[in-house]
Amino acid sequence: MTASPLDNSRGVYVDKLTAQALRNLPKIDEMAAQDIFSNSELTLPEELIVKVCREVVDEERNKLLEQEDYEPLSSEDLLKQAYSQALSLARPNLRTCVNAAGVVIHTNMGRSVLSEDAAKAVYEVARSYSNLELNVKSGLRGNRHNHIEGIIKELTGAEAALVVNNNAAAVMLVLNELAKGKEAIISRGELIEIGGSFRIPAIMDMSNAHMVEVGTTNKTHLYDYQNTISEETSIFLKVHPSNYRIVGFQESVDPVELCNLAHEHGIYVYEDQGSGVLVNLEDYGLPHERTVEEAIAEGIDLVSFSGDKLLGSAQAGIIVGKKELIERLKKNQMLRALRPDKLTLTALEHTLLTYRDTKKALRDIPTLRMLTKSYDETHIESENFISRLKSKLSQDALKDVELESLKEVSRAGGGALPAIDIATSLVLVHSKRWTATQMKDCMRLQFEEPIICRIIDDALALDLRTVLSPEQTEYILDCLVTVLETEPK
Ligand SMILES: *Cc1c(COP(=O)(O)O)cnc(C)c1O
């Protein structure tokens, strides 16, 4: 490279070509004034458009100065780059996605989807005043915690109930109230981490409870608890192992026996159920999950569970159990920081009301509907999808793809029903032009609403179980056609 005597603003000597490219860089003001930015889609203030243009041009200048043999971009390409950055700046980051991955309670995709009814109710309450803390009868101050206690009691058979922000908050509140400065006994088989670094021992620490472990990872007996009880013991903590399962040589203590032992010694039993099921899933082709009602009937003093896992509603932690204990929780100062907002309470109340009619719950609550969809139903859906896709593709594109349905499994996800396989029919897309990874990335990146898929056997795999509507199916079809009609860049 021959150095040109030209000295640019940084005092760096550059060759002639680079000098020319630097002179050719667009002027920021002219670039920001281009028609493309007055496009109606874009609602960005002018300063931000100027800022984006400057960033793009600066980056290009740096590359020209720092990288040898750098091929300069045309003004048109720079404009395109600035436009796409302006677009993504204008668009909210949190937006809807299409779940074609077949994980029903997908933690990364916001867990449960609200029922139509609950979503509408949230919309109404969001744009209006409400009686959140108003007692309409007396005209005096009311209590937000009262609205849904009744329906929770009705559905679970518990004496009392309280809702907090999420189940992690529920665990903290209960331990803080019942085990602060005292001992909480937990089986080593239940000392879990639930993802997002929610670890039982850490929560214990934060609640100032002293944790005492008993038993072994695979086996804990009643006498393990019995031999460990001391003056300081205030609760036995039972935790649902959620996203893992010990199979084979395994034993845990019968809950009724555990409750009897605890109550003889004035100790409370608290069970963190994680998912919290209100209907007997066994009746609908899924393995039995102990319901909240069963736990209460067995004598557990307090049970807590999430609102957005198997329950199928908004993020919340629901605590049910003995009235005397719930009253104590209601007086705990921590509750003020953990209380749910009106949108959550509305979603939850409407979801819970749906549970009065099990048939309706299974039909209208998306989480339950998707989990209980039969293999046969999914098979019909994937065969339909394949024939629709074939009819939409050009002959030219069609000869480069191979489509088939495959019997595979969907997952409940969200630490619910661990390791349970739900038989499902997948659509597999093999392509001569595209690798599976390329197709998967395109489906996620190339369209307005990201479509999340899986890869199986080097093919793009779509699980329609978690696709929410015929409109979404149509959207996936159109996007997939767009991909398959083209070649990878
Ligand atoms: C998911 C889960 C939690 C945390 O619940 P969040 O509602 O996500 O806060 C706590 N315990 C168990 C056993 C869980 O499965």
Image: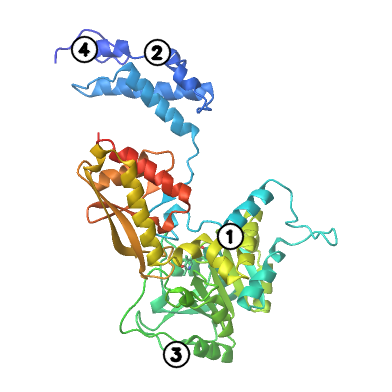
- Ranked by sequence position, the earlier of labels 3 and 1 is 1
Q: Cα distance, mark 4 to mark 3?
A: 82 Å
Q: Secondary structure at mark 3?
A: helix
**Amino acid type at image mark 1:** Asn
Display coloring: rainbow
Mark number for residue 360?
Answer: none
Camera-near label (2 vs 3) is 2
What crowding class fits label 3: few (fewer than 14 Cα within 10 Å), some (14-19), or many (20 or more)?
Answer: some
Whichever of labels 1 and 2 marks the residue nearer the N terminus, that label is 2
Query: How far is disc 2 from disc 4 in space, using C-alphas?
Result: 19 Å
Give the mark nearer the N terminus: 2 vs 4.
Answer: 4
Which residue is the site of mark 1?
A: 165
Neighbours of disc 2 within 10 Å: few (<14), some (14-19), many (20+): few
Residue 70 in percent (x, y) is at: 22, 22
Mark 1 beta carbon near ligand 1 (under 8 Å)? yes
Q: Is residue 101 visible?
A: no
How packed mark 4 is, by other alpha carbons closer than 10 Å (few <14, some 14-19, many 20 or more), is few
Residue drawn where x is 59% and y is 75% of the image? 178
Q: CA distance from mark 3 to mark 1?
A: 33 Å
| Label 1 neighbour load within 10 Å: few <14, some 14-19, many 20+ | many
| Location of mark 2 (residue) | 27
Query: In the image, which is nearer the foreground, mark 3 or mark 1?
Result: 1
Looking at marks 2 and 3 on the same chain, the residue that comes earlier in the sequence is marked by: 2
The amino acid type of the residue labelled 4 equals Leu
For residue 222, the mark is 3
Q: Is residue 450 left or right of residue 308?
A: left
> Quick one: 224 or 35, which is closer to the camera?
35
Q: Could you give the CA–CA distance between mark 1 and mark 4, rounded to whole angstroms? A: 61 Å
| Percent coordinates x, y for residue 149 in the rendering | 68, 69
User: Is the CB atom of the residue marked by disc 2 within 8 angstroms of ligand 1's nearest atom?
Assistant: no
Which x, y percent locates residue 110?
Answer: 48, 54
Q: Secondary structure at mark 4?
A: helix
